Image (cartoon, rainbow, N blue to C red):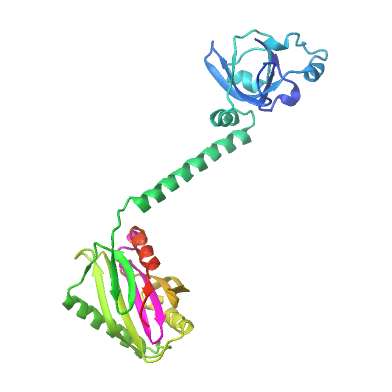
Amino acid sequence: MKVFASLRDDAHQGWVWLQKTGLPARSIVKITDPKSGRTVYCEALQIDSNFLDEYNLKPRVPITDPSSSIVLNGWYRAFLGGIATQSEYDLTVKLANGPWGKFRACTHHPQAVVRVAAWLGLLSIVLGLISVFLGATSLWGADWKYQRFNRWGIVFEYPKSFKQLPEADLLKMKRKLSGELDFVIKEGLALCGDRFIEDFTSFTPSDKFEVALSVMRVQFKKAPDVDCFLRERRISVKPEYDLKLLRLEKTKLSGHDAIIEDIEIMDRSNRSAGLHILTGTSIYEIAWFVRDKNKFKDWEIPLLHLIDTIRIERK
């Protein structure tokens, strides 16, 4: 196959000119020089009479046998090992219209912007696949099994590995939380009225207390308004109490007004996600406490499952 230099306008284009029967229009081809072992992928355009009329103008060396000729720009000639023009080479041309061939045609393109775009596209695909894989393993890697909580008119599912704390510990925690409520009232933060803890329980998967789930029903003297309760939470959770509010918003759970909050306990690097579900004069409060805030994501799946399965049955 005789090699010809490309026209000036084709010097920076990603195609070659040849004449090969049975080759679909603008196909991607793989050109190989068996002598050097070098290969290049590019687009192939068919040599026709219009091309020959322009190419064969003097003083350019004319193409007299299109079927055994190939027109290559300097980039592709260098890619194939520095082959010379007006010389015969035993080049092989094979159709490569698949995804790999099209990608390689971009990475072999004379223009740097096309090559960089191709590699960035491949990188984005790889990163996307990695994220899908990591997401899938996070969802399916942990074989979460759940049990049902059904007390005081609230139902939800939580991890089966969680065990209820002993009665003595529950009473101690209830007294501590009651004291915190008294503190809130004395500080003048009880904008929505006085309250007391009516029911309380807590669960943890181990005695290390790396994670804990607490559920309580707080009774108000009069039904609090969700906006009032939201304002009170904004006042109660602040840096002066070593608390950092990461999230606080209204929502609906099981047909009731609710507040979702995410709090970081700064002095101990703890993190707690809380749900407050308003049902008349009672508020169900569910707290998901993680000792190490950096491990909070490890427990997001069961926490989201708990929220999805919440149902209020109390009339």
Q: Quadrant of the C terminus?
A: bottom left
Was residue 63 drawn as part of the magenta stretch in this picture?
A: no
Residue 91 placement (x, y as % from top left): 60, 12
Q: Quadrant of residue 68?
A: top right
Q: Which residues are magenta?
A: 269-295
Residue 273 seen from this side: yes
235 vs 94: above or below:
below
- Residue appearing at x 40%, y 77% in the figure: 277
Residue 6 placement (x, y as % from top left): 72, 19
- Residue appearing at x 59%, y 9% in the figure: 90
- Residue appearing at x 51%, y 43% in the figure: 124
Residue 45 in the figure: left or right of residue 180: right
Residue toward you, 228 or 185: 228
Residue 190 placement (x, y as % from top left): 40, 88
Residue toward you, 275 or 191: 275
Q: Quadrant of the N terminus?
A: top right
Residue toward you, 62 or 169: 169
Residue 169 in the figure: left or right of residue 255: left
300 vs 88: above or below:
below
142 vs 33: above or below:
below
